[in-house]
Each structure stands twice: as C-alpha cells, then as structure tokens.
Amino acid sequence: MQFLYSSTASTGRRVPDPVVALVFQQGMTPAQAWRTHLGLSLEGVAMRLGLSAREYEQLELSAWLARSMRARVALGLGIEPGELDF
C-alpha cells in the first residue's frame, strides 16, 4: 500500500511530498527529512553553520527548536524557517 502525503508550511509554500513522507513514514524530524531530500551531508550542513557535526546532529534531532535555532537550521539547509513547520 502506498501513502501520499502533502503539507503546506507555515510560510504558505508547499513542502515537497518526499520531505513529508520521510517525516511520516520514517519518523525523521523535518530538518532530517529536508537534509536527506536535498542530498546534504550532516557534516556539510554543520560546516555551513560553524558547528561540529555532533552539535548540528543534536539540533536536527530535536523535536522542538527555539525560533532563533530553527532559523539557523533553515539557513544551513537553504530553506525558509517556516518550511520546518508542518
């Protein structure tokens, strides 16, 4: 059985179906799903943000991020902060 998922971020922009599916089918956080979808390595995103891979991984695995940290994670991923909210 195949499930189709669709979501709209708090920005009003549509979140790609593969990102939404990674969250709901594989239990990833939105940040993990976006990074996977974009083909980015954990180390690469961490480097963009000036963090160690371990520091970024802790942020990425967090179920809740403060607004400032959500903005920072989004910057590293090259997306809008609201695209992490769905």
Image (spheres, rainbow, N blue to C red):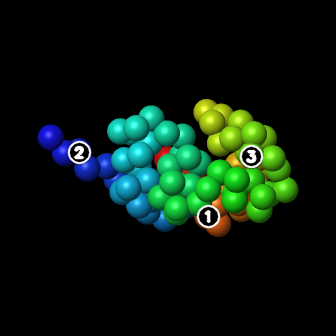
Q: Quadrant of residue 18?
A: bottom left
Give percent across and percent down for residue 60. 65, 42
**C-alpha separation, residue under disc 2 versus residue under disc 3:** 33 Å
Q: What secondary structure is found at the residue carrying circle 2?
A: loop
Q: Is residue 8 visible?
A: no
Residue located at (78% from left, 41% from top): 55
User: Badge 1 is on which residue?
Assistant: 79
Q: Amino acid at mark 2?
A: Phe
Does label 1 or label 3 sit earlier along the sequence?
3
**C-alpha separation, residue under disc 1 versus residue under disc 3:** 19 Å
Residue located at (54% from left, 40% from top): 29
Q: Amino acid at mark 1?
A: Ile
Above or below — where is 23 with respect to 10? above
Pick the quarter of the image with the N terminus.
top left
**C-alpha separation, residue under disc 2 versus residue under disc 1:** 25 Å
User: Badge 3 is on which residue?
Assistant: 53
| Number of disc labels | 3
Q: Outermost residue toward the right?
A: 50
Q: Are marks 2 and 1 in contact (CB under 8 Å)?
A: no
Q: Residues within 10 Å of mark 2 (few under 14, many from 20)?
A: few
Above or below — where is 15 with respect to 22? below
| Discs 2/3, front | 3
Q: Amino acid at mark 3?
A: Ala
Left or right: 13 as drawn, with respect to 66: left
- Disc on res. 3: 2
Does label 2 or label 3 sit earlier along the sequence?
2
